[in-house]
Image: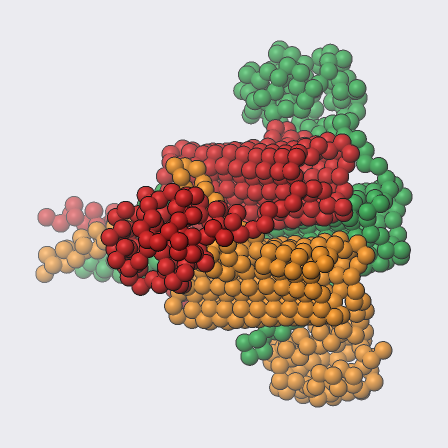
Chain colours: A red, B orange, C green
Amino acid sequence: MSRTLGAIAKALGGSLVGPADALIERLAPLATAGPNDLAFVAQARYASQIGSTQAGCLIVPPALLEAARVRGACLVTDDPYLYFAHLTQWWRREHEAAVEPGIHALASVHPSAQIGEGAHIGAFAVIGPEVRIGERCHIGSHVSLEAGAQIGADTHLHARVTVQRGCTLGARCVLHSGVVIGADGFGFANDQGRWVKIEQLGSVRIGDDVEIGANTCIDRGALDDTVIANGVKLDNLIQIGHNVQVGENTAMAGCVGVAGSAVIGANCTIGGGAVVLGHLSLADGVHISAASVVTRSIRAPGHYTGMFPIDDNAAWEKNAASLKQLNRLRERLKAVERAIEQAMKKSP
Amino acid sequence: MSRTLGAIAKALGGSLVGPADALIERLAPLATAGPNDLAFVAQARYASQIGSTQAGCLIVPPALLEAARVRGACLVTDDPYLYFAHLTQWWRREHEAAVEPGIHALASVHPSAQIGEGAHIGAFAVIGPEVRIGERCHIGSHVSLEAGAQIGADTHLHARVTVQRGCTLGARCVLHSGVVIGADGFGFANDQGRWVKIEQLGSVRIGDDVEIGANTCIDRGALDDTVIANGVKLDNLIQIGHNVQVGENTAMAGCVGVAGSAVIGANCTIGGGAVVLGHLSLADGVHISAASVVTRSIRAPGHYTGMFPIDDNAAWEKNAASLKQLNRLRERLKAVERAIEQAMKKSP
Amino acid sequence: MSRTLGAIAKALGGSLVGPADALIERLAPLATAGPNDLAFVAQARYASQIGSTQAGCLIVPPALLEAARVRGACLVTDDPYLYFAHLTQWWRREHEAAVEPGIHALASVHPSAQIGEGAHIGAFAVIGPEVRIGERCHIGSHVSLEAGAQIGADTHLHARVTVQRGCTLGARCVLHSGVVIGADGFGFANDQGRWVKIEQLGSVRIGDDVEIGANTCIDRGALDDTVIANGVKLDNLIQIGHNVQVGENTAMAGCVGVAGSAVIGANCTIGGGAVVLGHLSLADGVHISAASVVTRSIRAPGHYTGMFPIDDNAAWEKNAASLKQLNRLRERLKAVERAIEQAMKKSP
C-alpha cells in the first residue's frame, strides 16, 4: 500500500508540509473528512472552513498555507482543484484491479474484426465485421459495435454502449452505459401529410479524450458526418442531432438537446436542460445557462440566459397572466407618456 | 378463477353491495367500462359520471353509496383510488404466471456472486464478482450487475438494467428497462481550457420500495454517495447527478433533471421536465410545477412555478419582444409616476 | 454498378437534362458537393446558390431549370426535397448488403415464438413465449421481446430495443437502439404519504410506418392501451406517458415529454424539448414550438409558443427581476392611468 502523503506528493507534486508516512484512508469532502482523510480547499475564499474540518491533511493554495499548517498537515499547490482531479485518477489506479485483457468466451466477434493488443471484450458483446478496436480498449458487456466501427486506443465503452455502422471514436474516450452513437438523424420529407424517410447516409466522428454520459445519443449525419471534436465532455441523457458540430473542449450538462446542423464552438459550456435549435452557430467561448433555449446564432463569446424565474405558484400565476398582456401594457404606457407630454406642453 | 366481487371484497375489504358471485372480466375506466367490468369513482365531485357509466360494479366512497346502488352493484370504501391501487396489484397476481426461479443457462454469473433463494436470473444477464442478489429477486435479460453490487430481496430489475460497481439497492424496488445506476458523475477540473477528469469514487445507495422509470440515470457520487431514500418514485428519462440526495417518498415525473449535490426533501413532487440546479436544498413537502427551473434553495413547503405561458405564436412573439424591454418599461413607468407626482405638487 | 444519372432517373422519375451515363459518387449538400456528386435545390428561393456549387448534377424544380442547365446536368422534378428523400432510400438499397435471414446461433428464442419467413434475429436477442415476428423483420442484437409481443412485417428493431409483454407494433416500423416500449406507466395512489403502486394493466399499440428514435420510451397504459397511430415519427429521448394517444403522421422532435392521458391529434408537430401536460387534447394540425409547455387543451389548429427569449445574461437578470413584479407594474400603470384621467377631468 502506497497511500501515504509522501507517495502522493511524489506521484503528483506539490510541497508537503507534514509527515510523509501518514497513511490516507479516503479522499473526502471538507465537511465529512476525518483524521485519516485528505481534503482540499480550492480557493482562498473558503479559508473559513479550514478551522472546522477534521481532515488529516488539506490540499491548499499558497495563500492558505499559514492558515492550514497551524491545524495539521497540508499539501501546497497552485491549483488545488486540478491537483485533486489528478489525485482522484491516481487514487483509482491504486485501488482498482486492472481489467484483464482478452475476449470473453460469451462474446460474439466477427472474424474480420481487428482487436488491438491488451483489449478487453466483455460478455455478450457483439463486434461486427470490419470493426477495429484499438490497443488496451475496455469494451464492456452487452456492447454492440456494428460493421466498420472504429474505436481508438485506451477507450472505455461501459456496459451496453451501441456504436453503429461506420462510426469512429478517438483515443482515451469514455462512453457510459446506454450511449447510442450513430442512430439515424431525424429527417423526413412531407408528401401530402405522410412522412417519407430521408435515409441518413453520413456517420459520426468523435475525437480523442471525449466523455459521453449515460443514455446520451449522437445521431449520424444525413449526408455529411456529425462531428464531436477532441476533449468534448457530454453529460447524461443529451441529444445531439444529425450534422451537429461541437468544438474542442466544449462541455454540456445533462438533458441538453442540440437540434440538427447546429454548429457549436470550442470551449463553450451549455447548462442542463438547455435547448439549441437547428442550423444555428455558437461562437467559441459561449456559455448558455441551464434550461435556456438558443433560438438564434450567437456571434460573441459571453454568458447568455433565458429562463422563467421560479416563484411561489400564486405569485407566478399573477405575473404569468400579466405577461400575456405585456405588449398591451407597453402600448398603454406609451399612451400615458403621450398624454403627459401633451399636458406638459399645455401647462405654462 | 376467483375474479368475483366476493373474492375481491374478501381480499381487499370494503363493503360489497351486490351479488358476491358476479364475475369481473376487466378493471376499466368509467367511460369505457362494460357490464362485466369494475370501475371506480374517486371523489364525490365525479358523481355526475355515475349515471352514464355502463360498469357492472363501481368502487365508491360512502358519500356516493346511494347514487351508486340505484344503478347496480358497488363496493364502498373510504378511499376508492387507494382501493383501486391495491386491486390492480391483486388483479395482476391473479392473472400473471409467477416467474420461475433459477438461473438461465445463457446467463454469465461469477462464481463469487451470491444469489438468494427463489431468485430468477434472465438470459444474457451478467452478474459480476462479489455481487449479492436477495431472495426472490427478478433479474431480467441483458441486466448487468457489476462487481460488488447489492440488490435487496424481492427487487425486480427489468430487461437491460445496469447497476455499476458497488452500488446498492434495497428491497422491493422496481427498476425499468434501460436504467443506469452508478455511471460516473459529471466532474472535471479545467486545466487551461482542457478538462481533467475527476474520478468518481463514491457510489449510489438506493433504499427500499423505490421505483425507477425506463432509461433514467442516477450517477455515482464524487467522494460521498448519491442517496435515494425509501419509497422514492422516479419516472422515465430522469437525470440524477452525483451526490444528490432525495428524501423519502418524493416523486418526480418524466424528464426531470437534478444537478449535482442538490438535496431534495421528503414528500416532494417535481413535475415533468423540471430542472433543479446543483448545490440547492428543497425542504420537505415542496411541489415544483412541470418545466420549472429551480435556481435557488426553497426553505418552505409549498407550490412553486416558473414557466412561460403558452400562447398562439403571433401573440407570443409580441409579448416576448416586449419582455426583452421589461426593465426599460419599468424605468419608463417610474418616470411617468414621478412626472405625475410633480404635476400634482404644482397644481393647487 | 448502376449509380448513373440515367439509372437514377429510371428508378425515381424526373426529367434528366444531361448525360445518362454520368456516374454519381455521392449524394452531397450543395455547399460541399463536388463534380461527381448529386445535390438538390429545394426551392426557387435558394436559386442564388446554384451559381456557386461545384455539384456535378442538381435536382431542381421546373422554375430553376434554366438557371441550372447553364451550369451543367440537372434532374427536374416538382418537389426536389421529396425526390431527394426517395433517392436516399434508393441509394442505401444500392450500397448496403441485404441482411441475411436466419436466427443467430447465440439468440434465445422461445419454442412457442412464431418467426416470419425471411426474418433476421441477431446475436443475444431474447424472443419470449408467444411472440410473433412478421416476415422479413430485422431484429437486432440484444433486442428483448417479451411474452406475447407482436411485430409487423418488414419492421426493423435496431440493437438493444425492448418491447415488453403484450405490446404490438405494425409493419414497416423502425425502432432505434435503446427504445423501451411498454414499461409501466407512472401511477401511484398516496396512502398517508407513502405511494402505493397502481399496476399498469394496459399495453402499447403502435401502428404501421412508425419510426421511434434512440432511447425513447413509450409506457404501457394503466387500464386501456397507449396508442401510437400510423405514420407517427418520434425522435430520440422522448417520453410518452401511459394512455397517451398520438394521431396519424404526427412528428415530435427530440427530448419531448408527453404526460399521461394526453390526446394529440393527427398531423401535429411538436418541437424539441416541449412538454405536454397530462389529460389534455391537441386538435389535428397543431404545431408547438420547441421548449414550449402545453398547459391547456388546444382546440384550433395553428402555431403555439411559450418560451423565454434568450438574452445576454446581464439583460436577462434585469428583465427577469422585473418580471417578478409584472403584476405590480400593471397595477401601478392602472393607477397612473386613473390619475391622468382625473387630471383631465379637472383641467378645463
Q: In the rendering, at what x and y percent does residue B154 appear?
A: 69, 70
Residue at 76% from the left image edge and 13% from the top image edge: C21
Tag count: 0
Quarter location, residue B8: bottom right
In front of the other: C110 or C106: C106
Q: In the rendering, at what x and y percent does residue C239 appear?
A: 62, 54
Residue A243 seen in the current view: no
Q: In the rendering, at what x and y percent does residue C194 appear?
A: 57, 75
From what the image shows, is residue C116 above or below residue C194? Answer: above
Residue at 62% from the left image edge and 38% from the top image edge: A136
Residue at 74% from the left image edge and 88% from the top image edge: B17
From what the image shows, is residue A213 above or below residue C205? Answer: above
Q: In the rendering, at what x and y percent does residue B127 appear?
A: 69, 57
From what the image shows, is residue C270 above or below residue C192? Answer: above
In front of the other: B204 or C214: B204
Q: Is residue C130 left or right of residue B115?
A: right
Residue A23 seen in the current view: yes
Residue at 71% from the left image edge and 37% from the top image edge: A146
In front of the other: C242 or C95: C95
Q: Is residue C126 left or right of residue A223?
A: right
Give the farthest residue toward the front.
A21
Quarter location, residue A39: bottom left
